[in-house]
Image: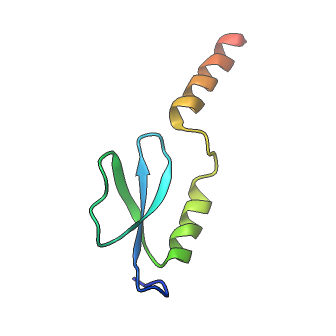
Amino acid sequence: MSEDADGQTYVVLVNEEEQYSLWPAHKAAPAGWSAVDCTGDKETCMAYVDAHWTDMRPKSLRDQMSGAQGSAA
């Protein structure tokens, strides 16, 4: 586990809408957010987010749009 230049260690969080956030590792995750398997300096955590959060639309919108496309066929 590495630390950022400011001495912070971060954890990557995700919510039910599959949106990601960096959070200081020493703080409890806020309600509605869960930690994923990535803890480290800011650069490491941002690389994880960049690799995993490829669609910025909230999950509910993606699901709605998928349903609308399926019913249009």
Q: Is residue 14 above or below residue 62?
A: below
Extreme residue in the right direction: 73
Foreground residue among 5 and 14 = 5
Q: In this view, does 47 lie above or below 5?
A: above
What quarter of the picture does the N terminus occupy? bottom left
Q: Where is residue 8 in the image (x, y as percent from the top left)?
A: 40, 80
In the rendered structure, the answer to whether residue 43 lies left or right of residue 41 reads: right
Residue drawn 34% across the image and 53% down it: 34
Q: Is residue 61 above or below residue 5?
A: above
The quadrant holding residue 28 is bottom left
Residue drawn 61% across the image and 61% down it: 51
In the rendered structure, the answer to whether residue 60 lies left or right of residue 26 reads: right
Foreground residue among 72 and 46 = 46
Query: How many numbered marks does the figure carry?
Result: 0
Q: Position of residue 26 (x, y in %)?
A: 29, 72
Extreme residue in the front direction: 6
Q: Where is residue 27 in the image (x, y as percent from the top left)?
A: 29, 67
Residue drawn 63% across the image and 25% down it: 65
The coloring applied to the image is: rainbow
What quarter of the picture does the C terminus occupy? top right
Q: Position of residue 15 (x, y in %)?
A: 41, 46
The quadrant holding residue 48 is bottom right
In the rendered structure, the answer to whether residue 26 lies left or right of residue 15 reads: left
